Image (cartoon, grey):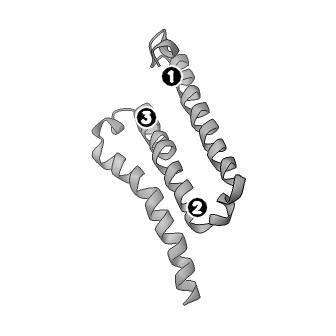
Amino acid sequence: MNTEKIKLKVIIPAILLILPVVLILIFDPAAWKSKYNLVSDILGTILFVDVPIGMCLWHWFKPEHFRESRWMIPFGLMTLGSWAAVAGAMWIDLRIGHGPENGFAIF
């Protein structure tokens, strides 16, 4: 009985985190046009879909980490991480020539 609970605690989050990436790769024909598109689709899905799902799963399995004022730590890290990822991705796009000259102004 206990091993079944542990298996479900591992299997359900794994499915919830892998499924969005698989669905994007199946239903987005542009993902397979170049290596750049494939990598950016996978990383974008992980960042903007899997990270929020992971935060929800974290709260579901470890609610004590979100009590009192400690809840601000994971959300602060997620906020800073998402802004750093978006700005970093835009910077990389501009450096490899996939973005416009005034990319940050447009962004």
- Single out the mark in the foreground, 3 or 1: 1
Q: Are marks 3 and 2 in contact (CB under 8 Å)?
A: no
Image quarter of residue 55: bottom right
* Badge 3 element: helix
- Single out the mark in the foreground, 3 or 2: 2
Distance from the alpha carbon under mark 2 to that under mark 1: 34 Å
In the rendering, which numbered label is found on residue 102? none
Q: Residue at x 46, y 35 (%)?
A: 40
Distance from the alpha carbon under mark 3 to that under mark 1: 14 Å
Q: Nearer the viewer, residue 78 or 5?
A: 78
- Residue 84 x/y as whole percent: 61, 32
- Residue 44 x/y as whole percent: 47, 39
Residue identified by numbered label 2: 59
Q: Label 1: how many residues lie within 10 Å, few (<14), some (14-19) or many (20+)?
A: some
Q: Are marks 2 and 1 in contact (CB under 8 Å)?
A: no
In the rendering, which numbered label is found on residue 35? 3
Q: Residue at x 55, y 17 (%)?
A: 95
The answer to whether residue 107 is left or right of residue 75 is left
Q: Are marks 3 and 1 in contact (CB under 8 Å)?
A: no
Vertical relation: 33 (above or below) 90? below
* Sequence-earlier tag: 3 or 2: 3
Label 2 amino acid?
His
Q: Considering the image in quadrants, where does the N terminus appear?
A: bottom right
* Badge 1 element: helix
Residue identified by numbered label 1: 93
Distance from the alpha carbon under mark 3 to that under mark 2: 35 Å
